[in-house]
Image (cartoon, helix red, strand yellow):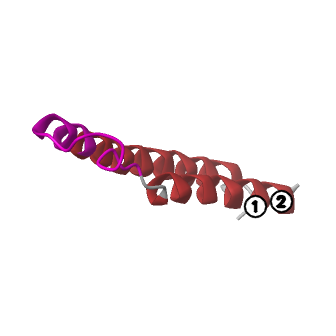
């Protein structure tokens, strides 16, 4: 069970890191205007926020899962 849990958390953290690394570029698809720049900035900050929230949830879940075993 412990090895399966570690693999699950490793996959979870890979997913979290991939969310942060995937590029979202509107400039190549749309005409660059002030609105497009604002939307891209909002998306960038949301990705960072989601990264930190999901990382925190993962770490807390990992701690609570293995708290009794350590």
**Magenta-tinted stretch:** 24-40
Asked which secondary structure carries label 1, the reply is helix
Image quarter (top left, top right, bottom left or bottom right) of the C terminus: bottom right
Pair 1/2: label in front:
1
| Residue 39 shown left or right of residue 58 in the figure | left
In which image quadrant can residue 13 be found?
A: bottom right
- Could you say where residue 23 lies in the image, as x and y percent from the top left? 43, 55
Q: Distance of mark 1 from mark 2, alpha carbons?
A: 6 Å
Q: Are marks 1 and 2 in contact (CB under 8 Å)?
A: yes
What residue is shown at x 33% (from left), y 41% (from top)? 46
Residue on which the image places disc 2: 2
- Could you say where residue 22 lies in the image, as x and y percent from the top left? 48, 55
Residue 6 badge: 1
Q: Nearer the viewer, residue 54 or 37?
A: 37
Q: Nearer the viewer, residue 39 or 29?
A: 29
Q: Nearer the viewer, residue 5 or 45?
A: 45
Q: Nearer the viewer, residue 47 or 53?
A: 47
Dot 2: few (<14), some (14–19), or many (≥20) neighbours within 10 Å? few
């Amino acid at each position: 069970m412990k090895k399966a849990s570690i693999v699950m958390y490793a996959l979870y953290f890979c997913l979290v890191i991939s969310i942060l690394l995937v590029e979202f570029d509107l400039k190549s698809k749309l005409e660059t205007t002030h609105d497009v720049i604002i939307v891209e900035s909002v998306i960038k900050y949301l990705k960072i926020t989601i990264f930190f929230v999901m990382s925190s949830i993962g770490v807390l879940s990992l701690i609570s899962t293995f708290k009794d075993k350590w």
